[in-house]
């Protein structure tokens, strides 16, 4: 299920974004820059926040990987 990222609290969205950007071993010194980039990509619709009920988790995925009207063209 696609979750509109603007409906999350600021703290919740920040937590999801920070978890996402640190998965690849991002250094803490780079985290704020990468987090800002991810947030901007969410705003542009290039990335989407997706909730998976089976694993009870959220993930951020490229919009072009989903077959959904909110996922771009």
Image (tube, rainbow, N blue to C red):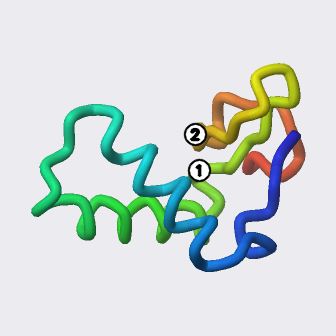
Residue density around tag 1, few if under 14, some if 14–19, many if 20 or more, within 10 Å: many
The reply to whether discs 2 and 1 touch (Cβ–Cβ < 8 Å) is yes
Q: Nearer the viewer, residue 47 or 34?
A: 34
| Mark 1: secondary structure | strand
- Mark 2 or mark 1: name the one nearer the start of the chain: 1
Q: Is residue 9 above or below residue 56?
A: below
Quarter of the image that includes the N terminus: top right
Residue at the disc numbered 2: 62
Residue beneath disc 1: 47
Locate residue 55: give its quadrant: top right
Coordinates of residue 19 in the picture (x, y in percent): 44, 47
- State the separation of the CA atoms marked 2 and 1: 4 Å
Residue name at image x 89 percent, y 47 percent: 69
Q: Which mark is residue 34?
A: none
**Left or right placement of residue 55 versus residue 43 in this view:** right
Is 61 located above or below residue 46 in the figure? above
Q: Is residue 42 left or right of residue 57?
A: left
x, y percent for residue 63: 66, 42
Residue in the foreground of this view, choosing between 19 and 39 = 19
């Amino acid at each position: 299920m696609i979750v509109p990222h603007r409906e999350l609290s600021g703290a919740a969205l920040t937590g999801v974004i920070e978890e996402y950007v640190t998965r690849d071993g991002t250094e803490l010194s780079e985290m704020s820059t990468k987090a800002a980039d991810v947030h901007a990509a969410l705003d542009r619709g290039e990335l989407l926040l997706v909730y998976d009920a089976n694993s009870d988790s959220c993930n951020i995925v490229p919009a072009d990987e989903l077959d959904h009207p909110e996922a771009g063209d």
